Amino acid sequence: MPTLFPQPKDLREAAAMQKLLAGAVIVGGNPEDARYIAALDASHPTRFSKQKGPSVAVAVLWDQQKGEVLEVATAQMDEALLFPYVPGFLSFREAPLYLAALAGLSRPPEVLLVDGQGIAHPRGLGIAAHLGVHLDLPAIGVAKTLLFGRPEGDLPPEAGSAVRLMNGSVQIGWVYRSRTGVQPLFVSPGHRVGMEESLALVRSLKGKTRLPEPLRIAHIQAGAARRAARSE
């Protein structure tokens, strides 16, 4: 699994890299038979507080057949070594952390489930798409907030409801309500997963909160790992 992640020297070069790599994204494929899913989440020092310590990332290896976590791998990096926080360019900041966490797993995953955007991104390359292309793995983005696009219509309040997320006349993802009455998630294919198939896989991963269960666990583990790293 490749770990070297090319970094741009400035935002202009970063945007050009994103546009180039977006052309390599494949929106097609069905991961329904995949057994091992890596759920990825990261935690950073709060920019608007005096919190210190490194940024951390977690890779939770989920066994889809058994419906359980097999292992958790963590990685951490000093903030000074990471690409600056710039909305729309978070993959350059977080991907090195995720790659380090993935390298700590004892077996390679078959699918990546990433806390962030897939192709629902101004230049078509959110973190899930960027990682998917870099690793040539099926990848899906599951974001808690809308970055780009507009819902095709009103989202019903019932669990399981979904409406298409559009960029003009082109679908780029889904607005999905995982539990009745909760805020929606924004699901988009990252690489080597079809539009319908990305939603189907996320729907199959029911969780105790609005997040798919592997991502819920990754989120909890990432927060715990950063608190532990901060206290060291």
Image (cartoon, rainbow, N blue to C red):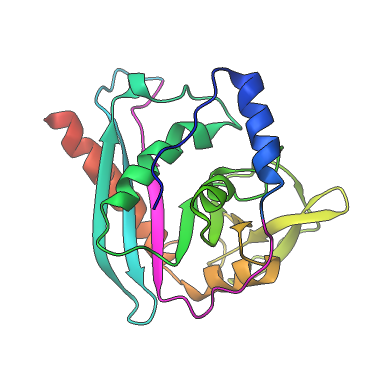
Residue 46 found in image quarter: top left
**Residue 146, image x, y percentages:** 64, 44
Q: Residue at x 46, y 31 (%)?
A: 93
Quarter of the image containing the C terminus? top left
* Image: 45 above or below 198: above
On whether residue 41 falls in the magenta region, the answer is yes
Q: Mark yes or no: residue 158 visible.
A: no
Would you say residue 137 is visible in this rendering? yes
Q: Is 129 part of what is drawn in magenta?
A: no
Q: Which residues are magenta?
A: 26-47
Residue 61 image offset from top left, x and y in percent: 32, 63
In this picture, is 171 found above or below 84? below
Q: Residue at x 88, y 53 (%)?
A: 169
Toward the viewer: 224 or 3? 3
Q: Main secondary structure of the magenta part?
A: loop
- Residue furthest right in the image: 169
164 or 66: nearer the eye?
66
Q: Quadrant of residue 87?
A: top right
How many numbered discs sit on the rendered protein? 0
Horizontally, is 222 left or right of 122 in the view? left
| Depth check, front residue: 120 or 209 | 120
Q: Is residue 100 left or right of residue 122?
A: left
Name the side, left or right, on which 180 lies relative to 37. Answer: right
> Quick check: 109 above or below 94?
below
> Percent x, y for residue 184?
59, 56
Q: What x and y, as percent, mark residue 218?
A: 34, 54
In this view, 63 is above or below 220: below
Which residue is at 34% across, 18% downward?
Answer: 80
